[in-house]
Image (tube, helix red, strand yellow):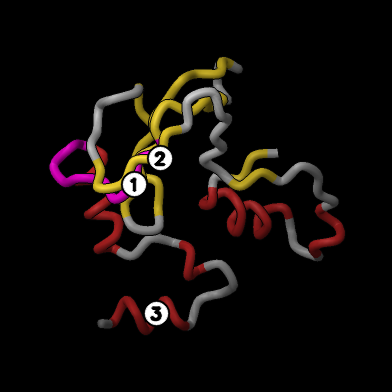
């Protein structure tokens, strides 16, 4: 497929970006038209916009998160019970010195933001 050829010639991190087929499946799982592969059920998730810690399900399809939802809205072939546990559906970078990466701020953002990086 032509998109696979383009993907192979991209820079570092490109392989983490979902393919078109993966995106289509993620959308179908997120709206409930397909079952998820795994659900991490009832974990404590930080809502970055409000600062609240909410009990949520992390819904996974393939190698990506399809949704973070209130508990019990989705079914999956595998459920990991996480009540009372903190779940970080993101990459946590506790501390970074951008100058050590030798990347421009825009390039660092391009590589890290699609992965859900939190600092």
104 over 14 or under it: above or below: above
Instruction: State the quadrant of the C terminus.
Output: top right
Residue designated by label 3: 6
Residue designated by label 1: 38
Find the magenta span and give its range.
31-40
Give the x, y percent position of residue 100.
86, 61
Q: Can see residue 110?
A: yes
- Dot 2 surroundings within 10 Å: few (below 14), some, or many (20 or more)? some
Which element type, helix, strand or loop, lies under badge 1? strand
Q: Can see residue 66?
A: no
1 vs 3, front mark: 1
Give the x, y percent position of residue 86.
58, 30
Give the x, y percent position of residue 16.
48, 63
The reply, left or right, for residue 105 in relation to residue 55 is right
Q: Earlier in the sequence, mark 1 or mark 3?
A: 3
Among the 4 quarters of the image, the one containing residue 30 = top left
Q: Are marks 2 and 1 in contact (CB under 8 Å)?
A: yes
Which is nearer the eye, 42 or 99? 42
Q: Which label is found at residue 80? A: 2
Q: Which label is found at residue 108? A: none
**Magenta region includes residue 19:** no
Q: Which residue is drawn at 50% across and 76% down?
A: 10
Q: Residue at x 36, y 47 (%)?
A: 60
Which element type, helix, strand or loop, lies under badge 2? strand
Label 2 – label 1 distance at C-alpha: 7 Å
């Amino acid at each position: 497929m032509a998109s696979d050829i383009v993907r192979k010639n991209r820079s570092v991190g490109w392989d983490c970006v979902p393919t078109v087929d993966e995106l289509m499946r993620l959308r179908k799982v997120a709206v409930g038209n397909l079952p998820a592969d795994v659900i991490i059920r009832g974990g404590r998730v930080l809502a970055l916009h409000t600062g609240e810690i909410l009990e949520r399900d992390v819904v996974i399809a393939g190698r990506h998160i399809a949704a973070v939802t209130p508990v019990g809205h989705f079914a999956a072939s595998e459920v990991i019970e996480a009540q009372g546990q903190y779940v970080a559906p993101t990459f946590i970078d506790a501390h970074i010195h951008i100058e050590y990466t030798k990347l421009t701020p825009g390039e660092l953002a391009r590589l890290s933001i699609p992965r859900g990086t939190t600092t």
